[in-house]
Image (tube, rainbow, N blue to C red):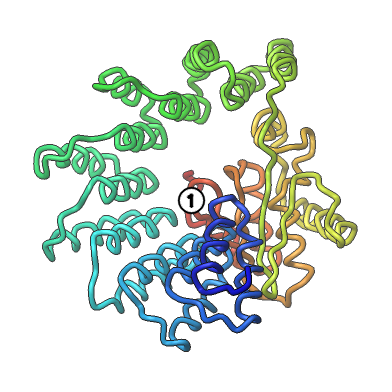
């Protein structure tokens, strides 16, 4: 272009984010600053979206200071984006502070804080904010109800969740959507109420989607209802033969019941259809740079030192009595790219890297694209104790805050 502008830079940054290239979006923003083009609110919104995707807390905090310094107007939209990004980067208290400092709030502002607290398992606080929102006269919408139902699910507040679900229609005239039904199924599943969850699904006024059925299968697996889980998995596979998650879930059930022949047949069928598993990937931000780790990967420049650190971590965990959950190799590794190596899961590589590169006591923050497996969850609790570190892991559904050998989720996730 013979002449660029804030609009053209912002359009490119937004395009990178929408295309899943958030790292490139951040680099382009830095290039924009170096070129002397002044960012505006649209630019900042794009950068915040990239930071949320990457879990880049340092960048998010810097953007907040940049907005103040450059005198960019802090509109409600910008504040809402900042709340959402801080929350997705693990700074829920920072998100709450931004919310409390807002002169004007919309239902989106309230919902963002409710979602933030829900993701970290602070269900009672999230419900308290929801009630506060109603008390000041802000009418909850369907998205706000998803937030409070998620909070109830993660905090095991079954009775409260049922009450909110019923109130949608009776008190606010909001017809529950399939996402709301999914929240209730998830809530029943997490609480071990598998039969109630199944009855609820069968009574739904619309056809349950595959996500709802997979939620039930996960509950069956977690609470020992393996025959029911197998039955649902087979039905899913027959109806949706192209989705890799359905193969993985049935394979998991076979592994738990030690039916190796059937498990192998599932693997062969996946291979024949060209279906591959999503590789486990973890991201950490350090000194303004984003580092990505894939399970069993050796592409990082410091991979030799990282692997040596992982081995040291394993020795220290054994010293305090941690025994690897080898059964996890049989199923949760289906969510990882490398089978047979719990030790090299992506989040362990990421944590080892941060332990190597930061002084004692520094907080560790990891963003993972998949659910944290049981072995890694137990191992990270031990690592937080051995190395005296607070470790925050954002997986695909929530935050885990590990400290002094325990986790904020209280082993319920």
User: Based on the displayed image, in which of its 4 quarters is residue 327 positioned?
Assistant: top right
In the rendered view, tell whether residue 61 sits above or below residue 320: below
Q: In what element is the residue under mark 1?
A: loop
What is the number of callouts on the image? 1
Residue at 24% x, 78% y: name it. 103
Residue 401 appears at what percent x and percent y?
Answer: 53, 60
Taking the image as shown, residue 36 lies to the left or right of residue 136, namely right
User: Based on the displayed image, in which of its 4 quarters is residue 169 positioned?
Assistant: top left
Residue 188 appears at what percent x and percent y?
Answer: 35, 33
Taking the image as shown, residue 199 lies to the left or right of residue 403, namely left
Q: Dot 1 surroundings within 10 Å: few (below 14), some, or many (20 or more)? A: many
Taking the image as shown, residue 206 lies to the left or right of residue 377, namely left
Residue 375 appears at what percent x and percent y?
Answer: 66, 43
Residue 128 seen in this snapshot: no
Residue 404 appears at what percent x and percent y?
Answer: 59, 64
User: Front-most of 85 and 190?
Assistant: 85
Residue at 78% x, 46% y: name it. 344
Residue at 78% x, 57% y: name it. 313
In the rendered view, tell whether residue 331 sits above or below residue 400: above
In the rendered view, tell whether residue 52 sits above or below residue 363: above
In the rendered view, tell whether residue 380 sits above or below residue 48: above
Residue at 66% x, 74% y: name it. 31
Q: Kindly identify which residue carries mark 1.
A: 398
User: Front-most of 13 and 142?
Assistant: 13
Outermost front residue: 2
């Amino acid at each position: 272009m013979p002449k660029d502008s804030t609009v053209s830079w912002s359009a490119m940054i937004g395009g990178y984010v929408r295309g899943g290239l958030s790292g490139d979006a951040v680099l382009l923003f830095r290039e924009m600053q170096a070129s002397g083009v002044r960012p505006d609110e649209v630019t900042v919104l794009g950068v915040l979206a990239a930071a949320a995707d990457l879990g880049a807390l340092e960048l998010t905090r810097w953007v907040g200071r940049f907005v103040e310094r450059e005198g960019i107007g802090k509109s409600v939209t910008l504040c809402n984006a900042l709340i959402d990004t801080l929350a997705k980067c693990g700074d829920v208290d920072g998100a709450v502070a931004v919310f409390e400092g807002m002169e004007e709030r919309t239902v989106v502002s309230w919902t963002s804080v409710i979602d933030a607290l829900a993701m970290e398992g602070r269900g009672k606080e999230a419900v308290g904010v929801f009630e506060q929102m109603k008390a000041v006269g802000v009418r909850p919408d369907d998205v706000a109800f998803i937030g409070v139902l998620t909070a109830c699910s993660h905090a095991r507040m079954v009775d409260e969740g049922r009450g909110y679900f019923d109130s949608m229609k009776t008190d606010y005239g909001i017809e529950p959507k399939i996402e709301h039904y999914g929240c209730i199924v998830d809530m029943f599943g997490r609480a071990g109420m598998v039969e109630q969850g199944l009855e609820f699904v069968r009574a739904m006024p619309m056809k349950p989607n595959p996500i709802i059925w997979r939620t039930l299968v996960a509950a069956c697996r977690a609470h020992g209802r393996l025959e029911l889980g197998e039955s649902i998995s087979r039905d899913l596979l027959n109806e949706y033969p192209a989705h890799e998650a359905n193969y993985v879930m049935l394979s998991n059930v076979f592994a738990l019941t030690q039916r190796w022949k059937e498990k192998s047949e599932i693997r062969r069928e996946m291979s024949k259809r060209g279906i591959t598993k999503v590789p486990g990937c973890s991201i950490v931000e350090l000194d303004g740079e984003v580092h990505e780790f894939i399970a069993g990967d050796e592409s990082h420049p410091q991979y030799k030192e990282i692997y040596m650190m992982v081995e040291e971590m394993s020795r220290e965990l054994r010293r305090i009595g941690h025994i690897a959950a080898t059964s996890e190799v049989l199923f949760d590794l289906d969510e990882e790219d490398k089978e047979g190596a719990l030790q090299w899961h992506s989040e362990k590589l990421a944590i080892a890297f941060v332990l190597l590169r930061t002084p004692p006591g520094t907080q560790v923050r990891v963003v993972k694209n998949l659910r944290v497996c049981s072995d890694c969850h137990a191992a990270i609790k031990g690592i937080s104790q051995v190395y005296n570190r607070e470790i925050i892991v954002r997986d695909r559904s929530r935050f885990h805050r590990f400290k002094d050998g325990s986790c904020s989720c209280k082993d319920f996730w």
